[in-house]
């Protein structure tokens, strides 16, 4: 329970009471709980959707949902996305890309990537039917955080300077992916039925492909790239779940 609470305080801005003295060991081993944090975020988004649907039209509600996701997470993953794209699209060598990513200032590519993610999430939420929307709101934060667990467990750390991301990688175990996958399976299969299998396969493949691509460019992954992967997989999940398939 302690590590779950730490995971909640790390991945969100929810006011959870937790000891101020957190050991590196406890912090490093919160990774398997990321998907449970995704469940909590998904439930909050469902509550927001339900409460606002009586007041505002669907487009306005969806806009507030995307903004609420940013507020709940404190922009943690979006910040990583912007830093990642500033570095990757800089046209510089590997060392310089990592230096750009460590820079606290945000460049044009970072701003553009954030706008694209925000607009894409809003577009795909609007494309969802009302009957599918609740399922999507619950699942896409879970898929995004699962992708971070996979990336941490299966790709090396790139940054020469140790950071919080390196702490997770240093203590990562392949078994963490197994434990993080359990909530995904428990929720996705009953909610999506047969669609769960192609959805999960696509998410797995894209997580691996994105992680592999970034790792090749940077020599591994960093804390920023974990956030970027989460944002991309969240958006991809909404895209997949909004596809109209009538069988």
Image (cartoon, rainbow, N blue to C red):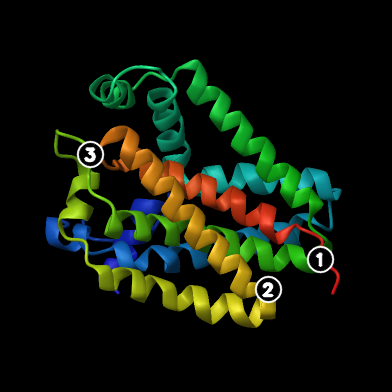
**Element on which disc 1 rests:** loop
Question: For this view, does 91 lie left or right of residue 223?
Answer: right
Percent of width and height locating residue 2:
26, 70
The label shown at residue 166 is none
Considering only order in the chain, which callout, 2 or 1, is on the residue closer to the N terminus?
A: 2
Q: Are marks 2 and 3 in contact (CB under 8 Å)?
A: no
Answer above or below: position of 117 versus 110.
below
> Judging from the image, what secondary structure is the residue with disc 3 in?
loop
The tag earlier along the polypeptide, 1 or 3, is 3
Q: Which mark is residue 158?
A: 3
Which quadrant of the figure contains the N terminus?
A: bottom left
Q: Whole-percent x and y of residue 10?
A: 33, 52
Q: CA distance from mark 1 to mark 2?
A: 10 Å
Provide the residue designation for mark 1. 245
- Relative horizontal placement of residue 39, taking residue 79 as reference (left or right): right
Could you say where residue 109 lies in the image, as x and y percent from the top left? Answer: 50, 21
Disc 1 and disc 2 in contact, CB within 8 angstroms: yes
Residue drawn at (40%, 27%), measured in percent from left and top?
88
Q: Quadrant of the C terminus?
A: bottom right
Residue in the picture at 72% in, 58% down: 49
Q: Does residue 17 appear in the picture of this structure?
A: no
Label 3 neighbourhood size at 10 Å, few (<14), some (14-19), many (20+)?
many
Residue for badge 2: 195
Q: CA distance from mark 1 to mark 3?
A: 40 Å
Please tell me how crowded label 1 is: few (under 14), some (14-19), or many (20+) other residues with Cα within 10 Å. few
- Provide the secondary structure element on which disc 2 rests: helix
Q: Is residue 237 left or right of residue 39?
A: right
């Amino acid at each position: 329970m302690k590590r779950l609470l730490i995971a909640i305080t790390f991945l969100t801005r929810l006011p959870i009471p937790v000891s101020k003295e957190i050991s590196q060991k406890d912090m490093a081993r919160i990774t398997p709980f990321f998907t449970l944090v995704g469940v909590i975020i998904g439930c909050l988004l469902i509550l927001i959707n339900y409460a606002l649907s009586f007041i505002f039209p669907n487009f306005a509600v969806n806009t507030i949902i995307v903004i609420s996701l940013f507020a709940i997470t404190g922009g943690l993953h979006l910040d990583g996305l912007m830093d990642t794209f500033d570095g990757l699209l800089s046209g510089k060598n590997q060392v310089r890309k990592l230096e750009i990513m460590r820079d606290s200032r945000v460049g044009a590519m970072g701003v553009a990537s954030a706008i694209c993610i925000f607009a894409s999430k809003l577009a795909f939420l609007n494309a969802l039917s009302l009957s599918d929307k609740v399922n999507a709101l619950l699942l896409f934060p879970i898929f995004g955080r699962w992708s971070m667990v996979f990336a941490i467990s299966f790709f090396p750390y790139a940054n020469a300077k140790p950071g919080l991301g390196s702490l997770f990688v240093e203590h990562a175990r392949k078994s963490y992916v197994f434990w993080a996958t359990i909530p995904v399976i428990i929720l996705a299969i009953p909610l999506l039925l047969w669609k769960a299998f192609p959805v999960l396969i696509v998410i797995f493949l894209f997580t691996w492909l994105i992680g592999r691509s970034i790792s090749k460019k940077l020599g591994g992954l960093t804390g920023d790239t974990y956030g970027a992967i989460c944002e991309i997989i969240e958006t991809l999940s909404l895209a997949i779940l909004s596809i109209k398939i009538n069988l």
